[in-house]
């Protein structure tokens, strides 16, 4: 939790951006895993954390802009709560710690929020909060999803996209833990090691240093599956292990790195060739990222590097610009170059990628691959983003494109099919846009060249 003055300043700025009406921010409640008393690890709503800072369940915040009043809504602990979960300072004391004077019980929320008010709320992503809003506003649950406040959403996105100095410190802490996780995964990348063992140990490291992992760990020899959460494999010589993992620190800020490591540290020539194309795309994207340039253009340049690198290997052919216009590189990189990151690893994805990653100037593309870019806006100092180019050989996608005779003027399918057993390579760093360019969020870079990674694996 930050100093109370930070939360007060954030709420005052939010009030100015929204201008009028009543703002309602709902915190999260406990979520049952398989029965009511056995819950998932509690995670507070990120926007609630940003403006209120309190991370206990069943809280809400009301900002009555018209009457210049604010309220924390919640119930004091009962003796049963204390017996089972321990004591906490009173809700009034916790509210004072974040600069809120007035606390009211849950039962009185319906007096502060009525259908007659101009109520601003964010689109709920949990059904519990959808039901609460449905009852408060006397709307059907589906209508609640449709009538969220665009004005509030845009205000929150505007504020949370630009990271303050104290937020950058927290992101650096998360990055430090992510660094340790990946370094350990590389050292464990030995023939005969179970994927599950590596995933479990690095996730345990995240918990030992902070709250949890920032997303479900992706660790697999089958790197061609972009979000592969299956850890059932046993590492084999000649294969690649893709590890995409991150940590959430004690103040809920995230890291998100990816490295792809040859099992045992021994790379084949094919693996070296593909790795170096991806590395070139990563490094050049970081050089390009700076205030004033659109991330959409950085993504397109990464596609250029992928296309020309694969053309040099004989897998592709033809004119670069024509191939980019046609979307050819998406066969090998069907995802976007990166996304905003902060309190969420995909920052504010609950508020909608269109609001977070695009605006009136920069619109999302409709072409396969390009349309998967989560963040395309013009970059500003204070943005924190991932940079994660990759090359994947997805047999089903390659088969589909060949069957449909797609882009035969650019793709040498006979050569591409020689890589059907390759898997995939992704390399990912987290960057902070600075006034003069960008820097790594955690300034100690993970091993990323073939030589650095091989040396790390063999040092275990």
Image (spheres, grey):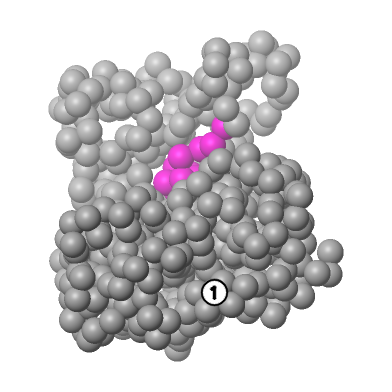
Residue farthest right in this picture:
460
Residue 156 horizontal/vertical position (percent): 34, 53
Residue 137 horizontal/vertical position (percent): 21, 24
Q: Which residues are magenta?
A: 42-52
For residue 313, above or below residue 74: below
Which residue occupies the foreground of this view, 121 or 344? 344
Can residue 49 be found in the magenta stretch?
A: yes
User: Looking at the image, which residue is at 73% across and 14% down?
Assistant: 83
For residue 122, above or below residue 171: above
Q: Can residue 454 be seen in the rendering of this structure?
A: yes
* Side of 343 relative to 154 (left or right): right
Residue farthest bottom in this picture:
436
User: Looking at the image, which residue is at 62% across and 28% down?
Assistant: 90
Residue farthest front in this picture:
414
Q: Can residue 164 be seen in the rendering of this structure?
A: no
User: Looking at the image, which residue is at 39% across and 54% down?
Assistant: 395
**Callout 1: SS:** helix
Which residue occupies the foreground of this view, 397 or 279? 397
Q: Which corner quadrant of the image does residue 175 belong to?
A: bottom right
* Side of 129 relative to 195 (left or right): left
Q: Which residue is mark 1?
A: 270
Residue 435 horizontal/vertical position (percent): 44, 84
Which residue occupies the foreground of this view, 187 or 132? 187
User: Looking at the image, which residue is at 58% across and 58% down?
Assistant: 242
Residue 411 horizontal/vertical position (percent): 28, 72
Can residue 295 be found in the magenta stretch?
A: no
Count of marks overlaid on the render:
1
Quadrant (top left, top right, bottom left, bottom right) of the C terminus: bottom right
Q: Which corner quadrant of the image does residue 362 belong to?
A: bottom left
Q: Residues within 10 Å of mark 1 (few under 14, many from 20)?
A: few
């Amino acid at each position: 939790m930050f100093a109370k003055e930070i939360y007060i300043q954030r709420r005052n700025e939010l009030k100015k951006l929204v201008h009028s009406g009543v703002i309602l921010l709902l915190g999260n409640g406990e979520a049952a895993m398989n029965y009511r008393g056995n819950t998932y690890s509690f995670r507070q709503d990120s926007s609630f954390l940003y403006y209120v800072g309190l991370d206990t369940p069943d809280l809400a915040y009301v900002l009555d802009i018209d009457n210049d009043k604010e309220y924390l809504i919640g119930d004091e602990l009962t003796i049963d709560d204390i017996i089972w979960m321990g004591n906490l300072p009173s809700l009034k004391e916790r509210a004072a710690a974040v600069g809120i004077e007035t606390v009211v019980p849950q039962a009185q929320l319906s007096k502060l929020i009525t259908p007659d008010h101009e109520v601003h709320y964010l689109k709920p992503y949990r059904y519990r909060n959808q039901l609460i809003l449905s009852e408060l506003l006397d709307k059907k649950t589906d209508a609640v999803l449709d009538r969220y406040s665009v004005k509030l959403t845009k205000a929150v996105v505007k504020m949370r996209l630009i990271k303050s100095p104290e937020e950058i410190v927290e992101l650096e802490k998360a990055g430090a833990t992510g660094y340790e996780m990946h370094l350990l995964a590389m050292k464990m990348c030995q023939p005969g090691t179970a994927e599950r063992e590596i995933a479990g140990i690095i996730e345990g490291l995240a918990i030992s240093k902070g709250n949890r992992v920032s997303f479900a760990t992706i660790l697999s020899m089958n790197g061609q599956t972009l979000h592969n959460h299956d850890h059932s494999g046993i590492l084999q010589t000649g294969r690649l292990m893709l590890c995409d993992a991150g940590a959430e620190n004690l103040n809920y800020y995230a890291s998100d790195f990816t490295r792809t490591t040859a099992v045992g540290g021994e790379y084949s020539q094919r693996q070296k060739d593909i790795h170096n194309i991806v590395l070139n795309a990563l490094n050049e994207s970081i050089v390009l990222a700076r205030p004033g340039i659109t991330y959409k253009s950085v993504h397109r340049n990464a596609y250029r590097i992928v296309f020309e690198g694969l053309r040099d290997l004989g897998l592709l052919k033809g004119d670069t610009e024509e191939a980019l216009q046609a979307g050819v590189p998406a066969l090998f990189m069907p995802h976007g170059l990166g996304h905003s990151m902060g309190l969420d690893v995909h920052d504010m994805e609950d508020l909608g990628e269109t609001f977070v990653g695009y605006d009136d100037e920069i619109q999302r593309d409709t072409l396969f691959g390009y349309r998967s870019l989560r963040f395309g806006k013009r970059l500003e100092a204070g943005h924190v983003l991932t940079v994660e180019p990759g090359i994947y050989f997805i047999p089903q996608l390659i088969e589909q494109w060949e069957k449909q005779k797609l882009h035969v003027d650019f793709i040498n399918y006979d050569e591409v099919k020689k890589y059907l057993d390759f898997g995939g390579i992704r390399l990912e760093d987290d960057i902070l846009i600075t006034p003069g360019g960008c820097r790594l969020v955690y300034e100690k870079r993970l091993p990323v060249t073939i030589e650095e990674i091989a040396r790390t694996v063999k040092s275990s």
